[in-house]
Amino acid sequence: MLATEGLAIRRGGRVVFSGLSLRARPGEALLLLGPNGAGKSTLLRALAGLLRPAAGRVLWEGEDVADDSAAHGTRTRYLGHQDAIKPALTPREDLAFWARLRGGEPEAALAALGLSALAGLPCRSLSAGQRRRLALARLALGDAPLWLLDEPTLGLDTASVARLGALLAAHRARGGIVLAATHLPLPLPDAREVAL
């Protein structure tokens, strides 16, 4: 289970939010909602262990994630605004790199996001939506229980959103947790909303 207790984040000398407590159990999804600047992306970065809270704690199964950040990194998949793709690699090479670190099958990940036909092209030739799908395909590698997604449908067409929905449903069915910041509807039935 993921939880926060009295979480406060300060960025650029201002408090973005404070006193935030939430819980997410296996199989649950939480949608982080709010206007631009409300702290959705900042919260995801803190939950991923990329930002230190000004106050409060982030807990995994009751233990502070700051006590073992390496362990927290292995259980977490974070997808930010940037797709973090090397332009000279092919999608197959990109996923093979990540599979060496996380496990999983690159070909299955490519197929899950409809990228098999593009697997041998250099990533620099992919459209913005195709690059986003490649970044999402990394979620299918390994078995990390916590997925933190920042605007995951950015640049996706309707068919790609449906593929993402299938990936999210399979993750939740295995007991995975999803927290997603979004301004658009996501294929996450029964997700709880957290307003920032």
Image: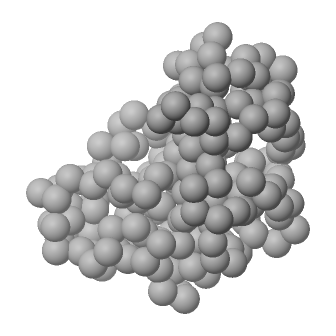
Name the residue located 63 percent from the left edge and 16 percent from the top edge. Answer: 66
Please state if 8 lies on the left or on the right of 41 as rendered.
right
| Numbered disc total | 0
Q: Residue at 52% across / 31% down in the picture?
A: 13
Above/below status of 56 relative to 82: above
User: x, y (%) of residue 39?
Assistant: 62, 49
Residue 40 at x, y percent in the picture: 63, 52
Q: Residue at x 57, y 79 (%)?
A: 161
Residue at (52% x, 19% y) in the render: 70
Q: Quadrant of residue 116?
A: bottom left
**Camera-side residue of 174 and 20:** 20
**Which of the image's four quarters has the C terminus?**
bottom right
Residue 93 place in picture, x, y as percent: 24, 53
Quarter of the figure that contains the N terminus = top right
Q: Farthest residue to the bottom: give it.
A: 158
- What colour scheme does the image use? one colour
Q: Is residue 150 visible?
A: yes
Q: Quadrant of residue 187?
A: bottom right
- 71 or 104: nearer the eye? 71
74 is higher (above) or lower (below) than 66 = below
Residue 193 at what x, y percent from top left?
Answer: 83, 61
Query: Does residue 186 lie above or below 140 as drawn?
Result: below
Could you say which quadrant of the image residue 21 lies in? top right
Residue farthest to the left?
88
| In this rendering, position of residue 156 left or right of residue 150 | left
Camera sees residue 2: no
Seen as rendered, the residue at the extreme front is 13
In the displayed structure, does residue 92 sit left or right of residue 88?
right
